[in-house]
Image (cartoon, coloured by chain):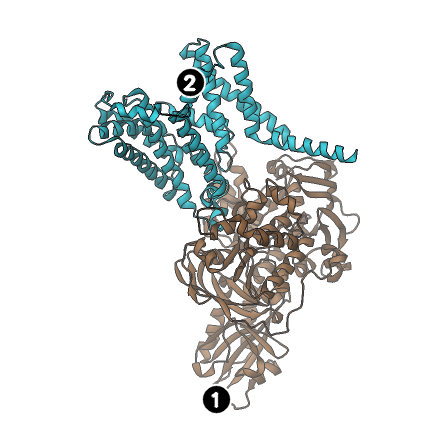
Amino acid sequence: MASTTAGATMRGSRFKMLAQRLEVRMLALALVIGFCLSLLSPYFLTHSNIFNMLDQSVVIGIVAVGMTFVILTGGIDLSVGSVAGLTGIILGLSLQHMPIVPAIAVAVLAGGGIGLVSGLLINLFGLAAFVVTLGVMAIGRSLAYILSGQTAISDIPEGMQDIVYTNFLGVPSNILFLITLYIVAWAYLTYTKGGRTIYAVGSNKEAARAAGLNTLFYSVLPYVLSGALSAVAVTFSISQLLSADPLMGNAMELDAIAAVVIGGASLYGGRGSMIGTLIGVFIMVMIRNGLNLMGVSPFWQGSAIGTIIILALLVERLVSSRASR
Amino acid sequence: MQHPPPQGDKPLLLAARDVTKTFDRTRALAGADFELAEGEIHGLLGANGAGKSTLSKIISGHHSFDSGEMLYRGQSIRLRNTRDALRIGIAIVMQETSLVPDLTVLENIFLPELGRPGRLDYAAMRERGRVILDSLGQSDSLPFDWKVRQLSSAQKQLVEIAKALGVGAKLIIFDEPTAALSPGEVSRLFDVMARLRETGRGLVFVSHRLEEVFSITDRVTVMREGRTVLKAHPTADLSQAELIRAMVGAELGAIYTEPHGQGETPGGPAILEVSHLAAQPQVKDVSFSARAGEILGLGGLVGAGRSETVEAIFGLRPRSGGEVRLAGRDLRANDPQAAIRAGLGFVAEDRRTQNIVPDLSVKENLLLAHLGAHRGFLRGYQSRERKVSELLQRLGLPEERLMDASMLNFSGGMQQKIIMARWLLLSPKVLILDEPTKGVDIGTRAGIYAMLRDIVAEGAAVIVVSSDFEELLGISDRIVVVSDGCTIADLPSAMLDEEKLTLLAAPRTSMAHNTAMLEHFAREHGGAGFWALVEEGRIICLNAVVANAALDPGFKAGEACIAAQTQIPRALSRREPIFVPEADNGRTTLLLPMRNSRGHDLGWVGLSLFPDAELPQPEAIKARIDSIAAAL
């Protein structure tokens, strides 16, 4: 008798602990949204639509990984969209001179290089991340237009399509890449010295430095990753479209930041997780997909998504403040 | 009795009953009682974390209270902010002053009026300022047109007092006002406070320096762990021992673990050697060494540059000169990671901003320095698992608390123990702790001291920075005194007491007058002048000026030695107000006592001359010493 009550309270407290985790609550929210949408549109839960949504998650999902790293350190990267646009053009131009693999390498290095510059400016000179990446955002988009000659580069080799449309065990390679990336990023953040340092830097940089952690390196690294991953993301877009447009990645920073924040990360740093971000990405994609299925005008979709983001965070804040009391 | 305790018929200015206050989850006040009469100086005492600062901040409107009652001149009050408090005449003079450094003295005194609409009448303000300073007996000590930035800490404090009077304060709280003052500045402050008492104002004096409490207060209230344990008791009826018992609690008589060997200190090899370290602007010239198996205290007044010194050693603050060697090898500047790997540990002063990582679990906080020292791609936590459980047992922390999501729910004492364990995990050769018991309850303090003893017993060196002289004397084997960014003394703590430490730690600015006087004596008569504490055959030299090398007394400023081993043993043993020739007749020495205006013993001033020189009149020398002592 006594042991069963003890077991019950144990289970009860474990459930409470689980419910206290933001990711768990957000996963519940994602399921609720999915359930509602499946009621509203019979097509929503079909096999092909689910793969379609996963496919739509790839680009934003990849960018959100870099953004999670940056936000964990207490920074922000507004330049991801225009870095994607610029590196997309660099990839398009490189493909005219070299094979696919080195061309992608050039684009990814360029993205990482831009991130390195932002990261150093922010952390060596103590400039505000918001302002530095805002500047880089403007420069990146402008260079994308100049390098492309204001038009899309459409003579992309067909071989690029293999990046997206090769299947392993029936799963497209881009979705596999996304899943692998999240697993690697999660393992890095959880089990490595660098990952824990990123959390510590975001939570209390001074204490991290006083404990001998290399705060400069791990404050800059997220920006490098974010820039490089923007280039990776645009590579997948170009492979699907077989065209590199200077407008690519427009407003992508908003989707990426929204996904990370919905996933429970704190903009002050130190709090957030890859699992949360992945759920955040799915919530964003599901809403957009569902609204499309229901035939909501794209002009209204922005309002709908914005409202849902704010409502989700508001509800979360109200629930969590009660939970912690 | 210099000033009688207030009579029962003196009207009450303030009465607080059963006041409670909780911050987040910490109970800062659990039932505080207090009362203050007009024309009284009331001492508010307690150990670190006893709640005296919280109570003063509630009275002055910085915090609101949760429950209880507060009566001011018979009316119930509930202050929402400091402006409310100032309006009804309650002001606080704080340690970190609330002045605006870039405005002038005059503007700061009348800062509350700058917000009023209309034109400021500077001439009238100047006149009122002069009246206020006159009433304090400090007419010429404040230049009205200087920026506050240029003032000394004592002058800034005077500006704060004048500011309080400018708004017509009836109740003034002095929160640890003497922490950054030299003995001379302290007695000047006490004169000011005595004048304020005469005008019928009520003063609260928050302090943990007992001798000051006895010399200035009429009544005392003692707090412990958020409660009032002794309420408004006449100071004259109390002995020092009774007061200590009230502050510490009867069961915790001796919190300092062991008395150390008299005069001799543990003599291991020097592990950490610091020579001529500078980190501008606060650290100018610091040299000392820490030996294996000893606790070295770094003493000095608030603002003397001790925290900056240890931060520069550890690499958190850029150095501008000097060397640091750990176990014989140079320690690079600006590289905490290299310092940690070489065997240095550092518990920084401010737990919340410099030590705790709030978003990491307790376990990861414990392992944070491991992560910094660790080489390799992965975390390597499992390699420390056994040591972690060992340490937890030593701390008395149940293992399951390790997985707690945040350290912030722990008491200050437990937080500090976990931060210490963070470093013990790495078995450092030298562990530096900056104010290790700040905000730690008295019970846990004893535990922390015992931990420090354990660490040195294992052969490490411990360096403790503390502003609490009693603590410093209680735990250290040896004390290095820092003043104005320079090391000025290095003495076994058994030779020191709080009073001597206070004299040694006095800012160099207040030493300037003294040096000028000694220089005057030495040059004018072609000899050597010194200022020293002399007792029981020992001498601690506070200052020395040698104009003629042949007359070197055999000790330098900041040095301690046996009187018999100096060049002037006879003079030191006789201590009479005449010139005493030494046995070899090589010199003759005049030794005169120095006392300040309050009758405080400030040691001895000596002048050594050749016996065939023209000896000055002792009375003339004495007059000069008295005039300096009065200003000191």
Q: Say which mark, if any, is on residue A52.
A: 2
Give the x, y percent position of residue B363.
58, 46
| Residue at figure coordinates x 49%, y 62% from the top left | B509
In the picture shown, does residue A197 fall above or below B581?
Answer: above
Is B492 or B616 nearer to us in this picture?
B492
The residue where tag 1 is placed is B612
The chain carrying label 2 is A
In the picture shown, does residue B169 fall above or below B495?
Answer: above
In the picture shown, does residue B252 fall above or below B380?
Answer: below
Residue B513 visible within the image? no
Is B342 or A92 nearer to us in this picture?
A92
Tell me the shade of chain B.
brown
Res A235 → quadrant? top left
Residue B435 visible within the image? yes
The chain carrying label 1 is B
The single residue placed furthest to the left in the displayed view is: A97
Tell me the shade of chain A.
cyan
Q: CA distance from mark 2 to mark 1?
A: 109 Å
Q: Secondary structure at mark 2?
A: helix
In screen coordinates, is B328 left or right of B221? left
- Give the amino acid type for the residue marked by disc 2 in the picture: Asn
Q: Are marks 2 and 1 in contact (CB under 8 Å)?
A: no
Q: Say which mark, if any, is on residue B577.
A: none
